Image (cartoon, grey):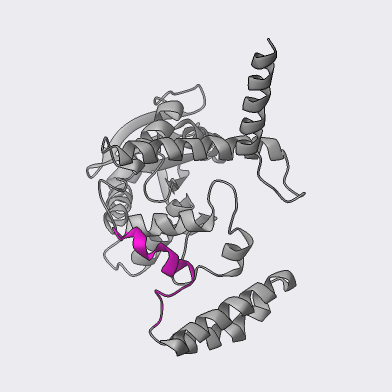
Amino acid sequence: MRSSCVLLTALVALAAYYVYIPLPGSVSDPWKLMLLDATFRGAQQVSNLIHYLGLSHHLLALNFIIVSFGKKSAWSSAQVKVTDTDFDGVEVRVFEGPPKPEEPLKRSVVYIHGGGWALASAKIRYYDELCTAMAEELNAVIVSIEYRLVPKVYFPEQIHDVVRATKYFLKPEVLQKYMVDPGRICISGDSAGGNLAAALGQQFTQDASLKNKLKLQALIYPVLQALDFNTPSYQQNVNTPILPRYVMVKYWVDYFKGNYDFVQAMIINNHTSLDVEEAATLRARSLPAFLPSFLLPQSMLLLGAVESSSRAE
């Protein structure tokens, strides 16, 4: 009995050690975030083991775990009609809000899910419920794009998928089918989906062949650049739960079909300029204007180290 209690105590202590991470006092429900982070770390470690054993690519294994626990069928309610279809060969899930007599043509949102260009799905519960809520509350048609993921495809195929699907949706006959007002169409996405939405928005503004244009862009914590991994947000969230900086850099490397040997060099921005000393000088000018005071010493130390390294070379 005594040995069982000792073993149980040890297991509880190990579990608490694995789950606990220091968080700012401003975080609401810190234990929920800790448990979510521990669950995701556990799933990552299992997928890495599967990769090491040669059974599957670690991102395929990780996404299988995510989708298996969260996949939701296209289920319609009294308020929102949900259907799975494809637009020009790209899978989409369409959410049609309730019709209103005073508003015969609906607004629309083309939504692109996040997940580091490698994870998640338009068909998991989180995104299904988000798009259902948008369709109902906005009286809108939501098109959630199921673009292909790393490692099955790499950059720029994800962009090609969302461009093809959106161009198809913007055709006059398709908008008419879904009773969408061509003057009220928005593009939106979160995280890596925000990156794809921004890329799509830029392409469409320059495409003179498009009769119908996007009228609004709504980006939710988008990934917008891979040139500087020491911006204020990267420094403030260097060890943030679920998505620390080194993991974000690895997603970029995976997206571009790169090599993990470059991750550490990218973290200190050795991938952006042949003239490192000049780059460090420019950052030294701009950082004080944007960085909180408690991060300035770290930034200047980093810049000094990079500059010294460039001189040594």
- Magenta residue check for 254: no
Residue 138 image position (x, y, % from top left): 55, 41
> What segment carries the magenta color?
256-273
Q: Is residue 280 above or below residue 67?
A: below
Is there any visible trace of residue 231 in the rendered image? yes
Q: Name the residue located 41 percent from the left edge and 77 percent from the top edge.
A: 272
Q: Is residue 208 above or below residue 17?
A: below
Q: Name the residue located 51 percent from the left edge and 40 percent from the top edge.
A: 41
Residue 125 image position (x, y, % from top left): 48, 30
- Furthest-right residue in this view: 25
The front one of 30 and 111 is: 30
In terms of image quadrants, where is residue 45?
top left
Left or right placement of residue 134 versus residue 8 in this view? left
Left or right placement of residue 5 versus residue 44 in this view? right
Residue 65 image position (x, y, % from top left): 41, 31
Residue 4 image position (x, y, % from top left): 64, 14
- Furthest-left residue in this view: 89
Left or right placement of residue 16 versus residue 142 in this view? right
Q: Is residue 280 above or below residue 88?
A: below
- Furthest-front residue in this view: 3
The front one of 201 and 112 is: 112
Of the 4 image quadrants, the one containing the N terminus is top right
Q: Name the residue located 40 percent from the left edge and 27 percent from the top edge.
A: 68
Of the 4 image quadrants, the one containing the C terminus is bottom left
Is there any visible trace of residue 213 in the rendered image? no
Q: Is residue 27 above or below residue 199?
A: above
